[in-house]
Amino acid sequence: MYLTRDEELILAGEEGESSRKAMELVVALGKIYGAEDLIEITSAHLSGASYKTIGDGGLKYLEDMAEGGAKVSVPSTLNPIGMDRERWREMHIPQAFAEKQLRIIELYKSMGVSPTCSCTPYLGDNVPSLGDHVAWAESSALSFVNSYIGARTNREGGPGALAAAILGRTANYGLHIDENRRPTVIIEAETDGSVFSYSMLGQAVGMAVGGGIPYFRGVEPTVDDAKTMSAAMAASGSVALYHVEGVTPEAGNFDISGLEKVSVGAKELREAYDKLNTADDIQLIALGCPHLSRKEMKDIATFLKGKKKKNKDVEIWFCTSSKIRAECADEVKIMEEFGPVLADTCMVVAPIEGIFKRTGTNSAKAGNYLPTLCSQDVVCRDILKLMEVVL
Ligand code: F3S
C-alpha cells in the first residue's frame, strides 16, 4: 500500500502517539481490504458515543487517545449518546451511567469533535456534497449520504472513523471507488407512499439482498422516506448504498441491463411487518429512529394538537437532535403534553432494558435492534396507529 512521505512519518510516530495509532489502524484496514493508497476526506461522523455501547473498554480507549493528544482534522460529528444531557433523570438513567456518559462527551470535545450527537447529522450541520469522500460510521446515516447525496464512504466502525477524522484521510477502497458503486440487483418496488411503508420496504429489501447495492424502480422517496429506508436496509441487511431511478444522483451512471430483478410489493411488506411485530401491548412508545426531522416534528405536533393523553401507563419518548429540538419550539410544546422530546439520544442506545419490556416504534431499524440490544418485545406500527394506544 502506497503512503506519502508525510503519511510514513505519521506512522513512525513523528506527530504523536494518537496520530500514530490512528495511522496504524487506517493502514491495517486498507491492507485487509486491498486499498492502494489513502484518500482525503471532508468530514467524519463517529459512532461509539453511548456508554451503553462502548462500556468501560471504550471509555478507556478514548481516555488514551485524548491523553495522546488526539485532535480531529476535519469537521466531525457524533452519534446519539445514551441519554439526554439535561433530562436523563426523566429517562430513568442511573447517576453512575450519566457520569460516565458525560465524561465520554468531554473526551470527544477535547479532541475537537462537535458534541452534536445525532444519527441525522445530514439534517444539521454535517452535510456532505456529491462526490465528497467522507468517513462515516452510523449505518443509517452513511447509507443516506452515499445514496441520496452521492457522497462516498464505507461502512466505518467507531475507531476507524475516529482514526480517519484525526488523519483527515481514510483507506481508498470499497465505496470510494466508482466501479464498486455499481448496482447489483433491480428492485421493482411498491409502497403506499407513507414513511412507514418505506420503512417496511427497507426491511424487506435488506432481508432480500443482504449486502448488495439495490437499484429501485417504481418509488420516489422523499428525504424522510429515504432516511427511514436507509436505516431499515442497513439493519435488516447490510446495505450501505442504493440507487433510486430518477431520484438519487448516481442512478443514471450505470448500465443495469442484465441485472436480476426482484419484485417487492404488498406481500413482502406484510412479511416484513409480521417479522418485526412480536408484542401486542406497549409500555413505551419511542419515536425518532432515525432522529425526527423538522417535518416529522411538525406532522406529529399537528396530529396531537388539541388531543389529550388518556393512557398514563404508557410513556412516550420523542427523539431528535438538539438542533432540531431548539428549532421546533412550538411543536415541542405540544408534544411535551404527551412525553419528553429528548435530544441527542435514542431508544436503542439508552439503557432501557430493565425499565421497559415492550416498546412501540414506527422504525424497522429499531424493530430489529430493540429485541437484540435492549431485550424488548416490539410493536412496530405507523406513528398514528401507535398513538391510538394513548388517546
Ligand atoms: Fe439513530 Fe438510534 Fe435509530 S442511533 S438510527 S435512533 S437506533
Image (tube, rainbow, N blue to C red):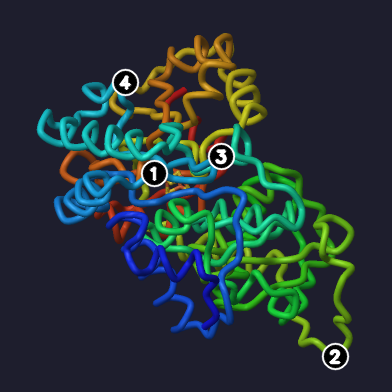
Q: Nearer the viewer, mark 1 or mark 3?
A: 1
Kind of residue sitting beneath label 1: Lys
Q: CA distance from mark 3 to mark 2?
A: 37 Å
Please rate how many residues cluster around mark 1, counting C-alpha atoms within 10 Å: few if below 14, some from 14 to 19, many from 20. many
Please name the residue shown 71% across and 43% down the image: 223
Kind of residue sitting beneath label 4: Lys
Q: Secondary structure at mark 1?
A: loop
Residue 381: percent from left, percent from top: 52, 46
Query: In this image, 321 relative to 94: left or right?
Result: right
Q: Answer yes or no: do the residues labelled 2 and 4 have beta carbons within 8 Å?
A: no
The residue lying toward the viewer, choosing from 85 and 88, is 85
**Residue 121, disc:** 3
Circle nearer the N terminus (4, 1): 1
Please name the residue shown 70% across and 73% down the image: 214
Residue 84: percent from left, percent from top: 33, 27
**Residue 258, disc:** 2
Kind of residue sitting beneath label 3: Pro
Q: CA distance from mark 1 to mark 3?
A: 20 Å
